[in-house]
Image: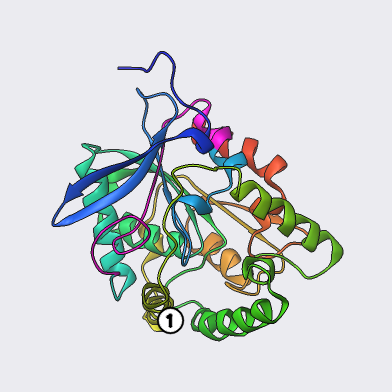
Amino acid sequence: MTDTNPITSYAEAPTRHVSAAGVTFAYRDLGPHGDIPVVFFVHLAGTLDNWDPRIVDAIARERRVITFDQRGVGASSGTVPRTLEEAADDAYTFIRALGLDRVDIFSFSMGGMIAQDLVLKHPDLVRRLVLTGTGPRGGADMDKVVLTTYVDLVRSALRRVDVKEFLFFNRNETGKRAAKAFLGRLRERTVDRDKEITLAAFNTQLFAIRRFGRSAPADLWRITQPTLIANGDNDRMVPSVLSEDLHRRIAGSTLVMYPDSGHGGIFQYHEQFAPLVAAFLRD
């Protein structure tokens, strides 16, 4: 059944809960029902409040969008899984708990790593796949994300700014402006905000990424879904060359690289990226 007057603004989407396998997952659901939904897989330390509303809203105008907190993060119960394979299993549990048997996936950073594991394990679940700011299991220098993250945490603490200013954006004038604008958009929601991730949960996720980076490469040739890959050309957190690696290894995929931008290139270029990804998911 299609909603006659669906919520299409992420800032207004209520937080909901669903329980499965002993975990209560927090999620938000917006956009018109009646089509294959787009499930968003968030980044390291990310909660429901870390999605750029300009991207979510662009998709939600014509598609059902579902965002969720991973187990042990934000308002979801349980303990953060020690591996991304387990996180993929949790994502599958959540999706099936909503009664869904076919979805599109939009993912960013760590979320893209989890999404790859999910698609490989449950290929019939996913119709289309968007991988942004991410890389493949066993990718070159993927395990260095731990050191980069800790260094930038110190740098941001010394300057008393959000660490995403360092991790997501270049430290030139263009990047600094993009960072301030992005962080401002994340604050547009003023009620029913999510809980921030705990330090213990953050460290567990971070070391799960390191295990992912040090693992044997996955058989990405098995991914046959139409796939859109996007990143900035100067990603320090998950090196941009790993997006190119994904593109080479996923047959028929499309690669978009945004100039003079880093890990958060899709947020810096949201005006160009949002309609591009909406069109890709529409086809």
State the image coordinates of residue 238 (x, y, percent, origin top left). Answer: 57, 72
Q: Amino acid at mark 1?
A: Arg
Q: Secondary structure at mark 1?
A: helix
Q: Is residue 278 left or right of residue 85?
A: right
Look at mark 1 in the image and give the residue it sits on. Answer: 210
State the image coordinates of residue 214 (x, y, percent, origin top left). Answer: 41, 84
Task: Out of 81 and 196, give the one closest to the viewer.
Answer: 196
Residue 15, quarter of the rendered image: top left
Which stretch did the figure color magenta?
Answer: 57-80
State the image coordinates of residue 62 (x, y, percent, origin top left). Answer: 50, 25
State the image coordinates of residue 93 (x, y, percent, origin top left). Answer: 21, 52
Q: Which residue reaches farthest front?
A: 191
Q: Which residue reaches farthest left?
A: 21
Quadrant the N terminus occupies: top left
Residue 228 magenta-drawn? Answer: no
Q: Is residue 173 left or right of residue 263?
A: right
Task: Out of 133 and 216, give the one closest to the viewer.
Answer: 133
Q: Is residue 213 left or right of residue 172?
A: left
Q: How many marks?
A: 1
Is residue 221 shown above or below 93?
Answer: below
